[in-house]
Image (cartoon, grey):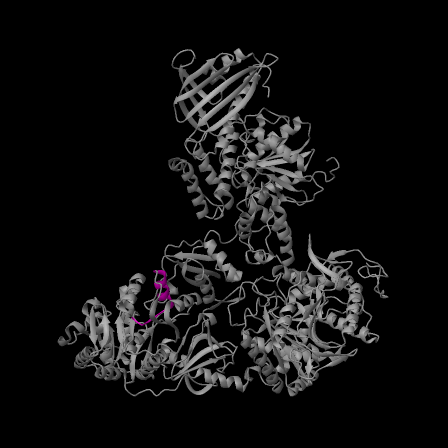
Amino acid sequence: MAAARTTDPMNPSHPAHPADRPAPVDSVRPANAQQAGLWFIHETDPGCSAYHIVFGAEVTADPRLGTEAGDIVDALTREHDALRTGFRAGPEGPEQFVRDTVAPDIRHTDARELEPRALRDRVRADSRTPFDLSRPPLWRVHLYRTAERTWVFTLVMHHIAADFWSLALLLSEVRSRLEGTPHRFTLDGDAFAAYADRQQTFLTGEKARGLLDGEARRLADAPPALDLYGDRPRPPAPSYDGGSAPFALSAGATEAVRRLARETSSTPYTALLAAYFVLLGRLSGQSDLLVGTPTSGRLNRKFRDALGNFVNTVVVRGEIDEESTYRSLLTTSRERVTEALRAQELPFPWLVRELAPPRDPSRTPLYQAGFAWDRLPFLTDMDAFFLLEPGPGAELDVAGATLRPYPLPQQEGQTDLWVEMGAEQDGAFAGVLRYNTDIFGAGTARELAATFVTTVETLVAHPDEPLRDLARGDGRQRARLTEWGTGPERAVPAARLPDLVRDQAHRTPGATALVAGAEQWSYARLLASVDEIAAALRTAGVTAGDRVAVMTGRGAPLVATLLAVLDTGAAYVPLDPNLPAERLTYMAEDSRARLLVGRSDLRDGRLPGLPLLDLDDLAAGPVPADRDGGGTDPTAAPAGTDPASGTADLAYILYTSGSTGRPKGVAIPHHALTNLLLAMREDTGFAASDSLLAVTTISFDIAGLELFMPLVAGGRVIVCDSATAADGAALATLIADSGATWMQATPTSWRMLRDAGWKGAPQLNVLCGGEELPLELAEFLHGAVASLHNVYGPTETTVWSTAGTVDPSSGIDIGAPLANTLLYVLDPQGRAVEPGFPGELWIGGDGLALGYWDRPELTAERFVTGLPAAPDQRLYRTGDRARWTSDGRLLHHGRLDNQVKLRGYRIELSEVETVLEAVDGVSTAVVVVRDDRLVAYLVAEPGAELRTADIKSTAGVSLPPYMVPGIVMVLDELPLTANKKIDRNRLPEPVVSSDAGFEKPRDATEITLARMWTEILDIPQVGIHDNFFDVGGHSLLAVRLSAAVLAEWDVEIPISVMLRQGTIAELATIVRSGGQETARGPVVTLREGDPQRRPVFLFHPFGGTVFCYVELTRHLPQGRPVLAIEAPGIANEGEAEISVEAMATRYIDLLREIQPTGPYALGGWCFGGVIGYEVAGQLRAAGEEIEFLVGIDSRAPIEENIPDSADDATILSWFARDLAVPAGKTLDISADHLRELGGDAAFDHILERAAAIGVLAEDADRAQILRYFEAYLANGIALQTYLPEPADLDLVLLRAAEEEADYGPKLGWESLIKGSLDVIEVSGDHNSVMYEPHAEAAALAIAPLLEGPTDDDEN
Amino acid sequence: MTKTEQVKAEYAFGLPVPPKEAFALISDPAQDPVWQAACVDVQLLDGEPRPGARYEITFQLIGKRMQFTVEIDEFEPGLRSRFHTLDGPFHYVGTYVYAENEDGTTTVHWTFEVEPGDYFGIMPKSLLRKVLVNSVKKDSGKLAAQLGQGARH
């Protein structure tokens, strides 16, 4: 491609290098596949610096050496295409061009005043300055002068033009020339370009096809993503921002790696990759893993000495079985690497395109973790220069200059995780872990790097032990786990709760203990009431160890009653009077309650088997049970034998929902309750001056904290009645009026308050728990109240086990363990998992329940003693997934059973809910899986109107497509359990909304987009809600689509937008909103076809649009272009024609622009056939030939066929009906009704109805639809006034055989057609004939006509 | 379309007869049903047409049947005529102006100013104008053909 030249045109005095060639002109060729991939990434994120290759060194030298080096760089630039290459968009995708001359980009900065740290920051920032790929050179040199003879020197190259090998070759070459020593290589200047040609040829060959088939088999059913639990929610598109964490193995481990590699006939690379697989398997919980690993791509000797980007990535598919050993894994990994390398000639971006894996724009395709082994076979004395932590003392003399390493992080953020190794430091393997900062913080990354080192060291030390027996981390990490997971040790007094309250009452008898409405009780009064009720209970026969059911309204007596039951030594069973009778009966019977304390009016005939102690008449003693009620005799029942039963320490039994559908009782001892109250008192600092507004029903265990904690602190309980607690506005008022300083509630309740307009309360401290705290709610509360505490704990560990103040800016964690509480994050074997790894949360300590009441098997299953992590502890298994961060925060990652798998993707439903709740107007969201689809149930904020399409589209900004619910249902309210938690079991059956599933294009914009897609993707049809990347689209095709959209509408849609809003409906919205209001031609290209062949012209039917021909075109034989003529009034106001003759005249002008002379192929459905008749007649009159004229169920325009005259309301009614036909829907609105509404109101009514059933795009603009109607009306008028004379024409008439209206066997055409009239019966009726499944039959009937001459010489 | 919006339609057509003959056909309301396809019926209320004379005319157009009482304002045979509605679903004013061509034939300039109000519902005024013009165009074309030589444009 290049001939020799002798002088440098930029510098004629410059001595010619022997390798110089005559000045070449710019050359252009398609980018090779790797380059195309990088170009695409750059297009989506032009600020991306993740693909910068950077070399840094500190140089002390004579300044003259710099001049000499500059000359060498000039010469090299002239010699090497790769140093003068740039990239730009071409019609078929990106193309590379080589400039004839390029001035090297050499920058100078005087840094003598800069502090070393500031200089380092500056250099690092400069190295990340993005390149403009269309403006070569795609490399630059920067010299920062730090002293008279010292510079920091950096070379930054974009990976699209060079790889690490090239960088080393270049450095090596400069060095050789400076030193005047012959370089061991002869650099090949244009091999880079030859490589692209060679690759292109290769990829079209048989071998590539065979390799691709092999890859398709090898990667079949691979997991769609590596699910790493990060510190932050994954953004919708990767930012390519990253960081680096260096690490080094010990010399011993390095030697062990080498030894094991030898023993297994593999390499250190494979041994370390296998260890990486182990790490990733444990981080993700997945066993099937894909890891990208780069290969040099310089298989051919010709390319070994060339500058350019030859690197290719192969995907190694690893499998982790924790039962197997590292040695066997190493052997397997060796085979897996070999399999992957077999296809290393297939460029990775090309492979992705061909395999078209499910696209998730938030992740890099196919693999999200990489492992690189960079080891140069030359330049070995510069090893230290390529390390991120080179160690002190490394320096090198080059041509009298002294070079010292100046390490710079680089190529960060390309994937979620990337480990790069190959270099050595003091005989030990060193490396760097690169990570994407979208997902990981620096601390976690450092921890991961350290964990990788530990993993390697553990594995090589125990190569023959099952992996499951080997620790993930080291002693240091495990020690920290114990520290983080252990709550403060506090002595818990032996005194029980009633005693503590009694003590308090003696200390402050006059202080207010309870406020309920207008009633205020002092501590003395409370104590008196407790004593009175307790006495009545004892009189009624209640003794220690009994259970007493309590069902009373919310008020001061409730608190007194609960304390009184405890005072007798019995346990209370709280019953919410709002619960169904059956459930109450079950609880009373299951707990074998001796007595019911409450009020007779609340009993309301329920629990007939229990004697009632009426609080309003204690002196009367208990009313005996109604034996006819069928209840059991509780007094007769013996105590159970399991540890949860029969103990005198039992404080209460709290029933929670059970998986079996029957509630299970959790038996909480006094000790646990006391511990909780004192621990929370201490944690919150609740004082005698504080008051707590208690809003929670007593059937929810957290009510215990609200009713009792203030009483052990000398403070006040303000008891909120049920009605106020359920009314956001009333509750907001009570918060303000009561002056409460604390309130505890679930996120659902806090949201209810917010939705009611509550703006917060500066004096109020908030405890939020019972459900996951969404970030957006935390942000609201954080700024609106005095303090926000997230509390976490299952009922089985007594209300709360952790608590912590929330700072939303650092994310949501669940706080630290309460006093005397132990937290463990364990693997399935019950071993502690180190920071960074997900595991199941187990809880031990003083808060533990005795177990499940009378459910010994369930108790044994959930309360376990003897786990490896804590052999002596009894632990409760929460079923929650959690993870310690490197700085000791405990993150909650949802329920283990709230995780679903859909189409192979692991989906955390709570994550989807969080995103939906962040959408404007959404108050609450619940997501469930029904029939393999995600269904979202939403409640709107007051006054907000939720549109499902908007919700999906907004959610799609934050979620990958597979996590966007397919069905969105908006409810007035969500069903709640008695505990104010969302009752997922009572959510209504989902109703598939109209925009789910396959839908046809609805307007000209969508039809054109659909046509582009089918052409670009080479697929037969596409629905408007299909995602481009889900139906076979990929980056390069997206480039083509973007170019096609630009050409059609002059609207630029960046590929990054396409990744997120990739459906036809979404793109059409962008086109409509971003399109310029330029007039659009009425010719719609339904199929581009072979431009050498004559087009088929189809005229619009009644209504003027041409959507109806999409299906027909799809089934017509390939080859001839198919063009449809839309009524001009569709696109442009005031253009509607109201006579067929005028239409024909106008359409002929359009035809002649495309095909100046006949023969013409004409046709149309319905009214389109009539237009075709007039067009054919006028063309014939003008002396043109007609190749054929087809009418598809077109009725002849004769007097008998003209419909009765119709007014505008009637035509509007038809218009509505016909709008719905293409969507396969029905929209019948009576003309009378429309006439009654009149004018604009009638039209708006149609728009609303059409949008409601998904017939019109929700954002379709009124003016556009009005134009449709204008065209429709004009057609109606034209049809009514067109009565042509017979003509000497031939007609092929397709008659819809199933049409009920009788217009005769030839639809009246025998009166008009003087030539041949062929009638072909096709399936369908007049309306359905153009749509599935009948369109295919019509196309088959027309197909023979299209087989006409392909030689268009006559045109 | 608001009630005050006006639609003005204009058209010129040729008739192969002298102006007076053309006037007798076009400006005489009694002849309207003969050459206007949309005209269903005419009743002269005050005898022969003249300024101040009234007539009742019924049209069937775009699916609507509409009856008007019209008064003739100007009636100058061979030159011009003008009329306006006194009663009916909406108001209109019509004018025919006749000009003799060199060959003795006639060019008729027709103008029609309508205030359709809400009568035609959502129909855009541009369309109504086209409907009106097209009616006259078709009718005059036919009339010219019937008169022997076809309309001149």
The quarter of the image holding the N terminus of chain A is bottom right
Q: Is residue A1135 left or right of residue A989?
A: right
Q: Which residues are magenta?
A: A740-756
Where residue A519 appears, x then y in whole percent? 20, 70
In the rendered picture of this protein, how many numbered marks are placed on residues?
A: 0
Is residue A372 or residue A624 the one in the foreground? A372
Q: Is residue A309 magenta?
A: no
Is residue A1012 or residue A860 the one in the foreground? A1012
Q: Is residue A746 magenta?
A: yes
User: Would residue A631 be seen by someone viewing this image from the given angle?
Assistant: no
In the figure, residue B51 lies in which quadrant?
Answer: top left
Q: Is residue A321 left or right of residue A562?
A: right
The quarter of the image holding the C terminus of chain A is top right
In the displayed structure, A1295 sits above or below A1042; it is above
In the figure, residue A848 lies in which quadrant?
Answer: bottom left
In the displayed structure, A1130 sits above or below B47; it is below
In the displayed structure, A757 sits above or below A534; it is above
User: Would residue A751 be seen by someone viewing this image from the given angle?
Assistant: yes
Where residue A1350 appears, x then y in whole percent? 72, 40
In the figure, residue A1292 lies in which quadrant?
Answer: top right
- Single out the residue that lies furthest toward the left: A620
Where residue A1278 appears, x then y in whole percent? 53, 30
Where residue B19 appears, x then y in whole percent? 54, 12
Is residue A610 or residue B14 the one in the foreground? B14
